[in-house]
Amino acid sequence: MIPSAFKFYKPDNISKAVSLMKDFGEEARVIAGGHSLIPIMKQRLTDIKHLIDLSGIDEIKGINITGDEISIGAMTTQVELINNEELFQKAPIIREASLQIADPQVRNLGTIGGNVANGDPANDMPGLMQLLDATYKLSGTNGSREVKARDFYEGAYFTSREDDEILLSISFESPSGGYAYEKQKRKIGDYATAAAGVIIKVENNKCSSASIALTNLSDTPVYCNKAVDMIVGKEIDNDLLDRVTKTCVDQSDPVADQRGPVEFKKYVAGIVIKKALKRAIERV
């Protein structure tokens, strides 16, 4: 499979990249790791005339940690997230989730920005960023703005990003409490049939705070606000965890595909959610 003809650009700063996006409009796309974009170009499912490579822009690379504030440049690769010890100490769930993304080849080239920006409901990082209540910084012809991860996703491959905007960075506060990211997939390298992330704090056997998010169980990441409201302030026991799990599953809305029918996906969702809850509590 060969993509149709296109022109290639490699700007060295964001201003040039945004200017190219403005000039070429809907005929232009930016490329980060390329694992989502290149396959659809090869299948000619999209007709891109201008491809803008962001790999030469140093200002959107790297991990900056100041106290409990964490900022990750959009062009930071998954392997850089995995290998950064300071990030692991501040937000170990990032490493746990990143290690479950695809395979080493993909993790060495794939970027956090590419993973969160294109709105693919099967990607792991969008749900994780909702779990962490992250903020996305974008830049376009009208300047820079910030959008909460929980407000960014509108549908499968549809986000609140404007056509001329480029994701610059992702920021969030260091989470506290127990954590877990559980993912069920058919084979190594595959997208999740269902995945769940949990961050929870428990004091005197009562949940003092919690965050729960799901991956590939709807056309957007699912932040389980109803389940969070249910568990916070309550004494932790198996009955409560069962009810929280059911509430999360009820909030999901998967579609049937090659990974299974809806009923199967909801069944798997219940398993990974319960496992994530239990493992996060064990780590408190």
Image (spheres, rainbow, N blue to C red):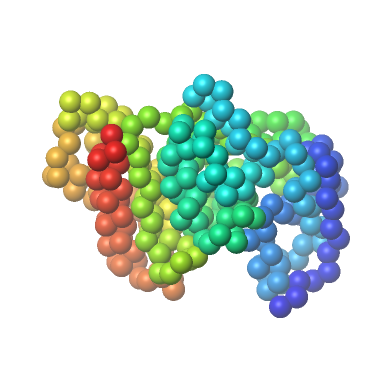
Q: Is residue 232 above or below residue 77?
A: above
Q: Residue furthest bottom?
A: 1
Residue at image coords 50%, 50%: 98
Residue at image coords 47%, 45%: 95
Between 117 and 34, the one lying in front of the other is: 34
User: What is the x, y in percent for residue 186?
Assistant: 40, 69
Residue at image coords 75%, 48%: 54
The C terminus - image quarter? top left
Between 211 and 105, the one lying in front of the other is: 105
Q: In screen coordinates, is 73 left or right of 59? A: left
* Total tally of numbered discs in the picture: 0
User: What is the x, y in percent for residue 103?
Assistant: 53, 62
Quadrant of the rendered image containing residue 81: top right
Quadrant of the rendered image containing residue 226: top left
User: What is the x, y in percent for residue 85?
Assistant: 51, 37
**Is residue 248 at all visible to an observer of this figure?**
no
**Is residue 178 at all visible to an observer of this figure?**
yes
Q: In screen coordinates, is 32 left or right of 178? A: right
Q: Is residue 266 above or below residue 32?
A: below
User: What is the x, y in percent for residue 93?
Assistant: 43, 42
Residue at image coords 71%, 78%: 1
Q: In screen coordinates, is 22 left or right of 183? A: right
Between 96 and 132, the one lying in front of the other is: 96
